[in-house]
Image (cartoon, rainbow, N blue to C red):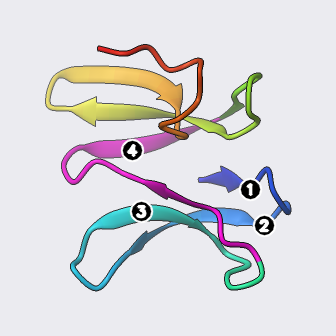
Amino acid sequence: MGKCPSDGGDLVIRRNRRSQKFIGCSNYPKCTVTLPLPSKGKITPTGEYCPVDNFPIAIFSYGSREVKQCINPKCPSRIKS
């Protein structure tokens, strides 16, 4: 997915006990960065990084609709829709 802005580890897609997807740092438990993901849709990494918070930018696909945005839901650069 990209590099963790906190410690440089890899951000990977994981599932919790209820099979919900989220992004977490590969250096867990040393690094506790986690980000929620939508339960449906597809996420495609772009290799780009957000200039605001340095999290990776991805393309979120929901059927025929695609949105290119920072993976951090609290990033000010994300447009509320």
Disc on the earlier residue, 4 or 2: 2
Highlighted magenta segment, given as a residue range: 31-47
Which label sits in the foreground, 3 or 4? 3
Label 2 sits on residue: 9
The dot on residue 4 is 1
Label 4 sits on residue: 43
Q: Residue 33: say if magenta.
A: yes
Q: CA distance from mark 2 to mark 1?
A: 5 Å
Amino acid type indicated by mark 3: Phe
In the picture provided, is 16 more to the left or to the right than 77?
left
Could you tell me which residue is drawn at 59 percent across and 21 percent down? Answer: 76
Label 3 sits on residue: 22
Which label sits in the foreground, 1 or 4? 1
In the picture provided, is 62 more to the left or to the right than 59?
left
Q: Is residue 1 above or below residue 43?
A: below
Q: Nearer the viewer, residue 72 or 46?
A: 72
Q: Secondary structure at mark 4?
A: strand
Q: CA distance from mark 1 to mark 4?
A: 17 Å
In the picture provided, is 58 more to the left or to the right than 5?
left
